[in-house]
Image (cartoon, rainbow, N blue to C red):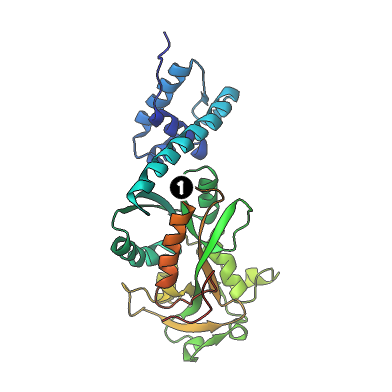
Amino acid sequence: MLRLEMTLRELRYLVALAAHEHFGRAAEECCVSQPTLSTQIKKLEGSLGAILIERNARSFALTPIGQDIVEKARCIVRQVDDLHTTARTALGPLVGPLSLGVIPTLAPYFLPWLVPLVKGHYPRLQLVVHEDLTQHLVQRLRNYEIDAALLALPLDGEDFEELPLFDEPFWLACPNGHPLAELKSVAQADLRGIPLLLLADGHCLRGQALAACGRLGDKDDADEVIDDFRAVSLETICQLVAAGFGCTLLPALAALPPQRPQPPFVIRPLHSPNDSRRVGLVWRRGYPKARELALLGNLIIDNPPAGTRRVLTRSGALSAQG
């Protein structure tokens, strides 16, 4: 006999599973165990009287009917979320949970500064942070899994709104005793022939650093990148620089974070045509809380973190900060 009821939670689990195509990662996203998620999906299949997922030990695939159900489930989840959003507007702006994606090269340095600022102005806002690579956060935005994301701009895609927040200059980090440590500042020409430690492919910062050095698209750039270490975090890169393995480029917030006022290496400001990255707040076009996100963005624009530069905003002008 068919179970006549399904739950919104089961639909959320199905949407997460379709997005991740992996039971373990979907369970982590939903903050449940993998057996719990699997059981709830089976209950949903029982309610619908249809097999939604082809299961075997090595692969995952939605059945044709499963693909249709996932699309409808996404619409249902989105509409329910919109109902909650509408109800919360009566309580005032920026109240309740807000799912915010942040790229890994920004999150550990920016969030300790951002969270107290937001709490001081909007104490009833609950930031739910998702740290991930740009391409994954963009997909989560498109899948309605997060509300907004802090990313490096510009972003490809006409289905997004972008609000520039600040420019983050690059700094050269080199070991003590390195020839570049003798300079007061570093120009693009000074980096010619200097091998760099960079993050692994997939991190947008890798391309931005190559552009800052004038090497993006250079056929010889592979000879000037140290690929023996395929690091996935800036902290690993920093430790390698401190140990004398090479030089790197760091965004300002990572170069001088408050928790590390005296870095174990030398840092010098970089001067080049692409000597900074632009950080912005991104959300889907038509997002019902766009005005609230603009409030959040304006809070950051009006209180930029030290070491960054103001950008030309809708009502501001370019100036230096900190």
For the C terminus, the image quarter is bottom left
For mark 1, does the 10 Å Cα neighbourhood hold few (<14), some (14 to 19), or many (20 or more) residues? many
Q: Position of residue 22 (x, y in %)?
A: 48, 36
Task: State the residue position of label 1.
Answer: 146
Dot 1 amino acid type? Ile
Residue at the far top: name it.
Answer: 1
Q: Position of residue 163 (x, y in %)?
A: 52, 63
For the N terminus, the image quarter is top left
Q: Nearer the viewer, residue 115 or 84?
A: 84
Name the residue at 48% across, 47% down. Answer: 288
Q: Position of residue 55 (x, y in %)?
A: 50, 25
Name the residue at 43% across, 22% down. Answer: 44
**Can you see residue 81?**
yes
Q: Does residue 126 lie above or below 214 as drawn? A: above
Residue at the far right: name it.
Answer: 219
Q: Nearer the viewer, residue 10 or 22?
A: 10
Q: Does residue 73 lie above or below 179 as drawn? A: above
Q: Nearer the viewer, residue 247 or 315?
A: 315
Name the residue at 48% across, 91% down. Answer: 184
Q: Position of residue 178 (x, y in %)?
A: 48, 85
Q: Does residue 152 lie above or below 131 as drawn? A: below
**Can you see residue 248?**
no
